[in-house]
Amino acid sequence: MDRKRREFCAVLLALKREEKKRWWVRTIFQKRRSRGASILIEEMRLSDTESYFNFFRMSSQLFDNLLSIVGPVIAKKDTNYRDSIQPKDRLALTLRYLATEDLMASLSYLFRIGRSTTSAIIKETCEAISSSLKPIVLAKPDQNKWLDIAEAYYEQWQFPNCLGAIDGKHVLIQAPPKSGSRFHNYKGTFSIILLACVDANYKFVLVDIGAEVHNSDGGVFRNSIFGQSLEKGTLQLPCPLEIPGTTNILPFLFIGDEAFPLKII
């Protein structure tokens, strides 16, 4: 009787262990390189550039340029157990998410990558894109750059000595854990504030991202690095120049709506 009981317990233990067994790599995900989204992406690249653009919201040339910048940052080493996910697949997955905000489960099956790995790749790649492109697209302007911006404003909008237009924008987000009402706005949604200064072609020159929504645009500007640098005179602004067609010498300025007080630095 004791022997049968021991055998029965051994069978139960084996069944429990089998229930807890997890996939190392699911069979469908093992076929990622031969049947994953990369095959469709390559086909669109070669024969359907319009669909390629719709898929990523960018051209293949821009994708390649971005990959050359962030690829070395997001590359992983192969191991004895499995090959790493290539940088181009990591970038493609992330750009598809940014273009569609698709569900993680849907992206997981599309790219044949585990759901938790999908989430980790998107987070890592977004951080890599931000850190890699910031020095390129949002480099701190010097006096020559400010003068170029002012010249463009005058040529396109006939507004002299203008260095940029400032405004704030609510960007919708999911409420961060345990944030309470910090990011709850008057429209009943959750958001953070994007404060931006743009040039004559609407391109960002300086940005401040992440302020809580209970702050006004003027308050966000006053507390931002941009506003504090302007107050301290550390933005390397050019010296006052003569207004075209007159003999009046006036300082350079930034323009904004009534949320930003008129102030002379």
Image (tube, helix red, strand yellow):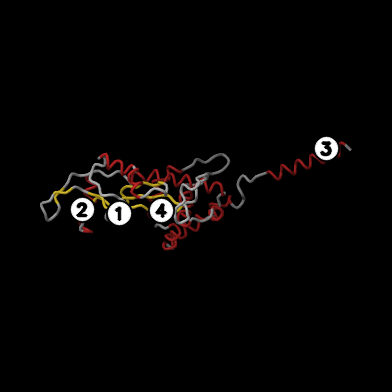
- In the image shown, does 12 or 235 lie closer to the viewer? 235
- Disc 2 marks which amino acid? Glu
How packed mark 2 is, by other alpha carbons closer than 10 Å (few <14, some 14-19, many 20 or more), is some
On residue 6, the disc is: 3
Q: Which mark is residue 258?
A: 1
- Tag 1: amino acid: Glu
Nearer the observer: mark 1 or 4; the answer is: 1
In this rendering, the label closer to the viewer, 3 or 2: 2
Which residue was labeled with disc 2? 151
Observer-nearest residue: 125 or 79?
A: 125
Residue under the point 36% across and 46% down: 208
Between the C-alphas of marks 2 and 1, the distance is 25 Å
Q: Which structural element holds mark 3?
A: helix
Q: CA distance from mark 4 to mark 2?
A: 30 Å
Name the spot of residue 102 as percent of width and height, x first. 51, 56
Residue annotated with mark 4:
170
Q: Earlier in the sequence, mark 2 or mark 1?
A: 2
Which is more N-terminal, label 2 or label 3? 3
Q: Are marks 2 and 1 in contact (CB under 8 Å)?
A: no
- Marks 3 and 4 close (CB-CB < 8 Å): no
